[in-house]
Image: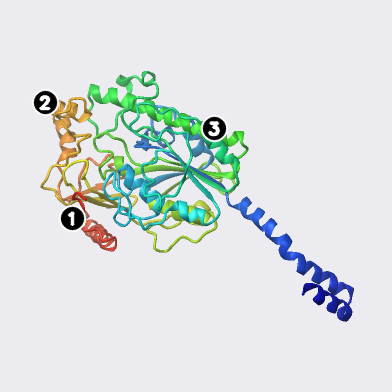
Amino acid sequence: MCFNLLKKCFLVYGFSTLALLICCCRLPAFAQSPAAGQQSAVRPNIVVIMADDLDSRQLSCYGGQNLKTTHIDRLAKEGLKFDNLIASEAMCVPTRASLFTGLYPARHGAYQNHKPVHADLKSIAHYLGDLGYRVALTGKDHMTKPRRTFPFTIVPGFETNCVAETDDYFLDSVAQFMQEEEPFCLFVMSCNPHAPWTVGNADAFDPATLKLPAHWVDTEPTRRQFARYLAEVQRLDDQVGDVLALLESKNQLDNTLVIFLGEQGPQFPGGKWTLYDNGQRSSMIIRWPKAIPAGRQTDALLQYEDITPTLIDIAGGTPDKDLDGRSFRALIDGKEGQHRKFAFGIHNNIPEGPAFPMRSIRDKRYKLIWNLLAEEDYHIKYMTNTNNKGQVFSSWRQRAATDEKARFLADRIVKHPRLEFYDLQEDPNELNNLADQQRYKKRIGTMERALKKWMEQQQDSGVAMDKPF
């Protein structure tokens, strides 16, 4: 058919038109390949490195004074550091489910620890897979079930069991995965620094000289355990360095968008399993030299739910409008300076202890925490069991018997009023509850209404969610 058209055009219009039509007829055969090449060039490979129970404020690039996190600091020096990434629930499964699905815990269903998401959901593995990415995961994989929701390619290499006493890892399989067809998205899920804090060199840290968080009780067991914890933070930094070195050795580093994530806070009192900043506030650093100038920093408020829509956006797709998160690509590109007005938090205590539901809302300066069962005591079997003398909190209670400051800090963990309201700028350790001060009543009212509106939108039933299922 094309030949007959060319013949007719030659007879009627002459040679010049014939030449033009030949180019047009041949165009599809030549246009597809360059277009694919262009798409590959603008769509980076993606490597997401995620910590496990990281106190992000211990990273030296976030102001930590107890160790030098050389490789994570390198990412911050060469990329964009986010100061206000908030985990909507300070537990491993809910946080990772939010990361992978772009949904808040009440909607993805894993709003209690170690529970699966709803089986009919899609995840980042679907969204990027549909855009031509190979999507894989190595390391901690307990948030990859059911498989129909999380169809990651599982790459051997990193430890899968977060409570293992070793974290031996190898990069051969990871290197092989990177060498295959591009583009790829690989999640490197470290188990550090999750308890039991048995890896790394704790002898590199002198417990007596460590700078403790201001909301901790200063006891010898606390310092000793903290030294072991920091050894695993150092081990995490070494893993980040090894992954960066691998990318460099494969000439992939500058074509790869590297994201470092801190997950949620540490397994110390006032951290993980709470809605305090030591539990909710995380870290994120993005290195992408083709789009991000070195040494940028932002205080924009984001949540883990925003990451999947952003990756979809970067990969050339359009994020589903039904997701709770939304892309911050414009912030990465420097076209916007802020992202969210509020970040939200949810905590359900079962199965880690008796019911103690909490909800939170915050902007960049103020946080409101609503304790829905304030008449009860908060208890976590892994953290506040004073019958277990090996737990750090047991030493806090012992000190509290004779020390008024220690008593205040220990009581703060287990006894909560209905509302807690903090000025995070003036009181970053959340030790001065301002909820009863008249000058904040209007602000508290506004935030409480916004929090309840969010819960309604999420179909969050509050107390009824903190029951066994």
Q: Earlier in the sequence, mark 2 or mark 3?
A: 3
Choose mark 1 or mark 2, whichever is in front.
1
Q: Which residue is mark 3?
A: 172
Mark 2 residue element: loop
**Which one is closest to the eye, mark 1 or mark 3?**
3
Residue 12 as seen in the image, left or right of residue 69: right
Name the residue beneath numbered marker 2.
402
Circle 3 SS class: helix
Residue 337: in sight, yes or no?
A: no
Residue at left 65%, top 56%?
Answer: 36
Contact? badges 1 and 2 (CB < 8 Å) = no
Q: Please determine whether, in this image, residue 327 is positioned above or below residue 295.
A: below
The amino acid on which the numbered mark 3 sits, given as a three-letter code, is Asp
Foreground residue among 265 and 399: 265
Residue located 11% across and 26% down the image: 402
Residue at mark 1? 464
- Residue 452 screen position, x and y as percent: 24, 60
**Residue 307 numbered tag:** none
User: Residue 326: where, in percent of width, then height?
Assistant: 42, 58
Which numbered mark, 2 or 3, is in the foreground of this view? 3
Which image quadrant: the N terminus?
Answer: bottom right
Cα–Cα span, label 1 and label 3: 47 Å
Amino acid identity at mark 1: Ala
Is disc 2 in contact with disc 3, using a CB cutoff of under 8 Å?
no
Mark 2 belongs to which amino acid? Thr
- Which class describes the residues within 10 Å of circle 1: few (<14), some (14-19), or many (20+)? few
Q: Is residue 12 visible?
A: yes
Q: Nearer the viewer, residue 294 or 327?
A: 327
